[in-house]
């Protein structure tokens, strides 16, 4: 079984408490998922990578974090279709 720390590391995220997970449009107009932290710079990833991360998080029982990512991915997909 994969640990939360390893899963975050594999996806380029620190093992820190996430303050906010939200859709974010980059300068190229592409919607991404942004992870904001109190003690570190925000990081972002593609909506596809974030959806895959959420699936993996559900599998290890991290349903709250996975749900927040799922919500952000749904919003990003909705925004990109407008």
Image (spheres, rainbow, N blue to C red):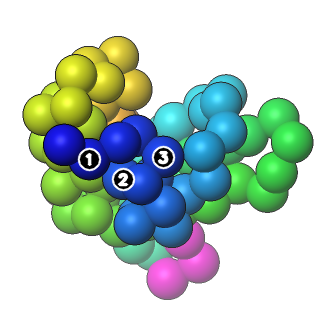
Badge 1: few (under 14), some or many (20 or more) residues near its Cα, within 10 Å? few
- In the figure, 24 relative to 20: above or below? below
Inspect this view and state whether residue 38 appears. Answer: yes
Position of 48 relative to 42 (above/below): below
Image location of residue 40, percent across then percent down: 82, 51
Q: Residues within 10 Å of mark 2 (few under 14, many from 20)?
A: some
What x and y, as percent, mark residue 81?
A: 18, 55
Magenta stretch, residue numbers: 24-28
Name the quadrant containing residue 70. Answer: top left
**Disc 3 on helix, strand or loop?**
helix
Q: Name the residue under label 1.
A: 2
Labelled pair 2, 1 in contact (Cβ < 8 Å): yes
* Disc 3 + disc 2, Cβ < 8 Å: yes
- On residue 7, the disc is 2
Residue denoted by label 3: 5
Main SS of residues in magenta: loop
Measured in 3D between alpha carbons, the distance from the residue under mark 3 to the one under mark 2, in whole angstroms, is 6 Å
Q: Mark on residue 82?
A: none
Determine crowd level at label 3: few under 14, some 14-19, many 20+ residues with C-alpha closer than 10 A: few
């Amino acid at each position: 079984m994969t640990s939360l720390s390893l899963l975050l590391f594999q996806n380029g995220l620190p093992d820190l408490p996430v303050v906010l997970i939200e859709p974010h449009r980059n300068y190229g107009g592409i919607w991404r998922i942004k992870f904001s932290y109190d003690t570190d710079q925000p990081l972002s990833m593609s909506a596809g990578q974030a959806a895959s991360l959420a699936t993996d998080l559900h599998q290890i029982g991290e349903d709250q974090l996975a749900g927040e990512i799922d919500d952000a991915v749904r919003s990003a997909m909705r925004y990109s279709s407008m």
